[in-house]
Image (cartoon, rainbow, N blue to C red):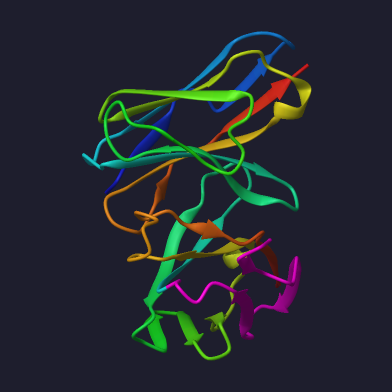
């Protein structure tokens, strides 16, 4: 049973436009969420995170929004650049639920930004 | 910057061989993890460790074992490699909740 779901395996966006990547979760104990970016033949790199006490976190072109009632988060990239083309993984953690920092990952969304 | 290194980027082994994948981190992190990544399946946790000599099974531990003799080093062992263990193997370490990944080892078992 998938606790973290990324329902879109792929997304194609024009350069300069907004990319919106979505993630849904089922476990109400999750209280910390992260996005990772992965290029082929490389390890994932941490991008941005958000605690459940917030509903928005920004870092440059990247913004993560959290809707706890809907158990939904999204990553916005504005403006999108060709170098953003990668697989994006959503991850969640239950910091006080005994998981000791384990992350549960979604299956990823492959973003293609076309020039 | 956190640095996580893995012993090999690419590895080709024969069915039945014993395979060692090494991972070293330089940030004095307590927690270390081994994942495999397969197309359409995302990142799946094989084993993790919260301290030296400690290990816990993840979601897919079958066919694998691990060793953590020193805090900075976490090894993944395939006791008898099989073709269904062909995959990208990723090591990670964390102090809190952000996990930092190594570059990965692409293992092919023929």
Instruction: Please say whether residue A28 is one of the residues in the magenta stretch.
Output: yes
Q: Is residue A81 above or below residue B88?
A: below
Q: Residue furthest left?
A: B28
Instruction: Please say whether residue A105 is one of the residues in the magenta stretch.
Output: no
Q: In the visual, does B101 lie left or right of A1?
A: left
Residue at 59% over, 74% down: A26
Q: Is residue A12 above or below residue A56?
A: above
Q: Is residue B104 above or below residue A78?
A: above
Q: Quadrant of residue A110?
A: bottom right
Q: In the visual, does B45 lie left or right of B102?
A: right
Q: Quadrant of residue B9?
A: top right
x, y percent for residue B34: 49, 37
Q: In the visual, does A99 lie left or right of B90?
A: left
Whether residue B103 is visible here, answered yes or no, is no
x, y percent for residue A30: 45, 71
Whether residue B88 is visible here, answered yes or no, is yes
B47 or B9, which is in the foreground? B47
B28 or A16, which is in the foreground? B28
Q: Which residues are magenta?
A: A1-30
């Amino acid at each position: 049973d998938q606790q973290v779901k990324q329902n879109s395996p792929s997304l194609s966006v024009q350069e300069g436009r907004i990319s919106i990547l979505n993630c849904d979760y089922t476990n109400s104990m999750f209280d910390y969420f992260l996005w990772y970016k992965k290029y082929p033949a490389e390890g994932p790199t941490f991008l941005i995170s958000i605690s459940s006490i917030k509903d928005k976190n920004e870092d440059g072109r990247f913004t993560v929004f959290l809707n706890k009632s809907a158990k939904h988060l999204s990553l916005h990239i504005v403006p999108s650049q060709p170098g953003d083309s990668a697989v994006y993984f959503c991850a969640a953690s239950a910091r006080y639920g005994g998981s000791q920092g384990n992350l549960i990952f979604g299956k990823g969304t492959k973003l293609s930004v076309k020039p | 910057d956190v640095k996580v290194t893995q012993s090999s980027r690419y590895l080709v082994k024969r069915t039945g061989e014993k395979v060692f994948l090494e991972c070293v981190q330089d940030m004095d992190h307590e927690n270390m993890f081994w994942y495999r990544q397969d197309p359409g399946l995302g990142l799946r946790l094989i084993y993790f460790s919260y301290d030296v000599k400690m290990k816990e099974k993840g979601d897919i531990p079958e066919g694998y074992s691990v060793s953590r003799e020193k805090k900075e080093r976490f090894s993944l062992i395939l006791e008898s490699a099989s073709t269904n263990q062909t995959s990208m193997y990723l090591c990670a370490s964390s102090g809190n909740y952000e996990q930092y990944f190594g570059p990965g080892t692409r293992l092919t078992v023929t």
